[in-house]
Image (cartoon, rainbow, N blue to C red):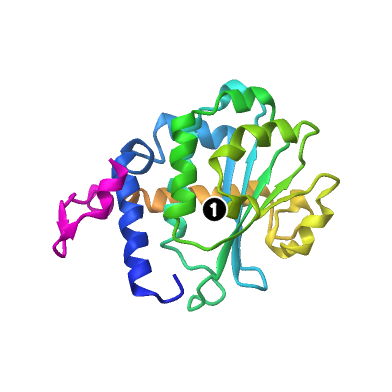
């Protein structure tokens, strides 16, 4: 929020209002339950180490198992937010714990994605995810990179584009030929070996992410961290939370 106090207060209110509205995505969760294990067994949700030269954080999302029946959109989205919430309470740059990131870059590996996967999207979950990302995510989203794009990418985009604001859609970069173009935005030293980088193997990075989830399990599941009382009045005015009813 660039130091703007009122904008910061609004962001926090919207963040917690959306959490209360969708407790099955943000509150009722456990990184060790069967749903979470199933997600992490077939997909990777991995924060990558370090920061870009612009001080951006980078995260990677990909399928490890391409079987569409493994996808459970709501449970997968809940796992995504658990990883994100853990990241917000860890240092942005382990090499310099006083540095704060200036934004977030997301990489979506589309390898193995089919229209059968898209058919398993839950519209209510997609709507909640996009609303949170656009209105309540406490980062500055700088870019979304789509790599290993299939030939039918336009059909996939036609499904999800109605839920995405023009501002966010302009941040999407499609890498349709090869992954080399990704290196212009994300340094190789931040990328896994499997993507031509030097940050270690996906197995190693996956293990590190799971360790953090385990270490922060009590935090993620503690209702005192996430459940707030809904007040009808705030400073003599109707609560802005009413818009989420």
Nearest the viewer among 62 and 168 is 168
Q: Which residues are magenta?
A: 221-245
Q: Tell me which residue sits at (19%, 49%) in the image.
A: 230
Residue 148 makes an appearance in the image: yes
Q: Quadrant of the N terminus?
A: bottom left
Specify whether residue 48 is painted magenta: no
- How many marks can you see? 1
What secondary structure is marked by label 1?
A: helix
Q: Position of residue 25 (x, y in %)?
A: 38, 39
Image quadrant assignment for residue 101: bottom right
Nearest the viewer among 65 and 59 is 59
Specify whether residue 228 is painted magenta: yes
Nearest the viewer among 208 and 70 is 70
Q: Is residue 53 left or right of residue 207?
A: right
Q: Tell me which residue sits at (81%, 50%) in the image.
A: 179
Q: Position of residue 61 (x, y in %)?
A: 61, 45
Q: Position of residue 207 (x, y in %)?
A: 56, 48
Image quadrant assignment for residue 152: top right
Circle 1 is placed at which residue position? 208
């Amino acid at each position: 929020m660039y130091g703007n106090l009122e904008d910061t207060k609004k962001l926090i209110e919207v963040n917690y209002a959306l959490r209360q509205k969708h407790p099955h995505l943000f509150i009722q969760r456990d990184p060790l339950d069967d749903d979470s294990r199933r997600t992490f067994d077939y997909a990777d949700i991995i924060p990558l180490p370090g920061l870009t030269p612009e001080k951006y954080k980078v995260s990677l999302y990909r399928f490890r198992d391409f079987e569409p029946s493994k996808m459970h959109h709501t449970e997968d989205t809940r796992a995504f937010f658990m990883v994100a919430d853990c990241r917000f309470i860890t240092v942005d740059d382990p090499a310099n714990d006083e540095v704060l990131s200036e934004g977030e870059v997301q990489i979506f590996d589309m390898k193995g994605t089919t229209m059968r996967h898209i058919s398993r999207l839950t519209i209510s979950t997609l709507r909640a995810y996009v609303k949170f990302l656009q209105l309540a995510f406490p980062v500055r989203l700088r870019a979304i990179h789509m790599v290993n794009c299939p030939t039918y990418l336009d059909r996939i985009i036609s499904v999800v584009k109605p839920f995405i604001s023009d501002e966010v859609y302009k941040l999407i970069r499609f890498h349709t030929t090869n992954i080399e173009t990704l290196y212009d935005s994300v340094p190789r030293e931040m990328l896994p070996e499997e993507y031509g980088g030097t940050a270690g193997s996906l197995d190693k990075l996956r293990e590190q992410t799971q360790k953090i989830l385990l270490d922060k399990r009590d935090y993620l599941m503690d209702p005192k961290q996430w459940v707030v009382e809904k007040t009808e009045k705030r400073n003599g005015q109707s609560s802005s939370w009413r818009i989420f009813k």
